[in-house]
C-alpha cells in the first residue's frame, strides 16, 4: 500500500472515530438530562455547526491544494488563512450572537446561561478552525499520520470529557 493511501486511510479512520464520539454522545445525552437541557445542547450544537461553517468556509481545502502545488508558499498561505479564519469566526460570532439575543428576546428565556455556552461554542469554533488549518498544511505536504494521531488523541479526550460531564451532572437534571 502506498504511503499516500495508508495516510489517507489512517486520517479517515481517525475522523470517523471523532464523528462517532459526537454521535454516541447525542444518542446518550437525552437519557440523562431533561428535555429543556437537551434543547439547549441541541441549540449549541447547531450554533457550533453553523459557526464552524462560517469561520472556515472552504479555506482548508484551498490551503491543501495550494500547498500541494507549491510547498514553499506554506508560511504565506498559513498567515493569510489564519487571518481569514479569525475574521470568519468574528463574523460568525456576530451573526449567531445576534440570533441568540433576538431569540432570547422573543421567547423570554434568560440569556445568561446561553451566553456563557455561546462563548464556549465560539471558542471551540475558533480552535476547530485553527486545527483544520494545521491539518490542511499537513495534507498539502502529504504527511497525514500526525493529524490522524492528534485526531485520535483529541477524540479520546473528548469522549472522556463527555463521559465525565454526564457522570457529574447534578441529580435534579
Image (cartoon, rainbow, N blue to C red):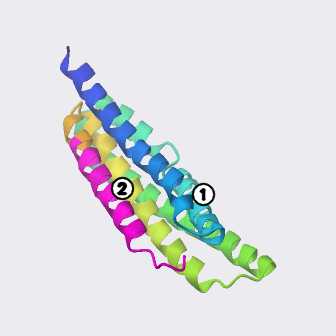
Residue 86 placement (x, y as % from top left): 44, 62
Q: Does the magenta portion include 115?
A: no
Q: Which residue is mark 1?
A: 46
In space, the residues marked 1 and 2 are separated at their CA atoms by 20 Å
- Where the N terminus falls, by quadrant? top left
Residue 31's disc is none
Seen in the image, is 81 located left or right of residue 14?
right
Residue 151 is inside the magenta segment: yes
Instruction: Out of 97 and 169, give the one closest to the viewer.
Output: 169
Label 2, residues with CA under 10 Å away: few <14, some 14-19, many ≥20:
many
Local SS, label 1: helix
Task: Tell me the SS state at disc 2.
Answer: helix
Give how far across and how far down residue 138 sits, in percent. Answer: 25, 39
Q: Check contact, mark 1 vs mark 2: CB within 8 A.
A: no
Residue drawn at point x = 40 percent, y = 48 percent? 21
Toward the viewer: 20 or 150? 20
Query: Which residue position holds label 2?
Result: 130
Q: Which residues are magenta?
A: 149-173
Q: Nearer the viewer, mark 1 or mark 2?
A: 1
- Where on the picture, by quarter, is residue 36? bottom right
Q: Earlier in the sequence, mark 1 or mark 2?
A: 1
Q: Residue furthest top?
A: 1
Above/below status of 28 relative to 148: below
Residue 68's spot in the image, x, y percent?
30, 30
Rendered image quadrant of residue 74:
top left
Left of 13 or right of it: where is 120? right
Task: Count residues near mark 1 (Cα–Cα under 10 Å), then give few for <14, some for 14-19, many for 20+.
Answer: few
Amino acid at each position: 500500500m502506498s504511503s499516500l493511501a495508508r495516510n489517507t486511510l489512517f486520517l479517515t479512520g481517525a475522523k470517523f472515530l471523532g464523528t462517532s464520539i459526537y454521535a454516541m454522545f447525542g444518542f446518550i445525552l437525552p437519557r440523562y438530562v431533561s428535555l429543556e437541557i437537551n434543547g439547549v445542547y441541541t441549540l449549541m450544537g447547531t450554533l457550533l455547526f453553523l459557526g464552524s461553517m462560517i469561520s472556515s468556509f472552504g479555506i482548508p481545502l484551498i490551503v491543501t491544494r495550494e500547498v500541494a502545488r507549491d510547498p514553499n508558499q506554506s508560511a504565506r498561505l498559513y498567515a493569510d488563512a489564519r487571518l481569514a479564519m479569525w475574521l470568519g469566526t468574528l463574523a460568525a460570532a456576530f451573526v449567531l450572537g445576534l440570533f441568540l439575543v433576538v431569540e432570547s428576546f422573543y421567547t423570554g428565556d434568560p440569556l445568561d446561561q446561553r451566553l456563557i455556552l455561546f462563548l464556549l461554542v465560539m471558542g471551540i469554533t475558533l480552535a476547530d478552525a485553527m486545527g483544520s488549518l494545521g491539518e490542511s498544511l499537513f495534507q498539502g505536504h502529504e504527511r497525514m499520520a500526525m493529524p490522524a494521531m492528534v485526531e485520535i488523541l483529541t477524540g479520546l479526550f473528548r469522549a472522556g470529557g463527555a463521559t465525565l460531564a454526564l457522570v457529574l451532572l447534578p441529580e435534579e437534571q
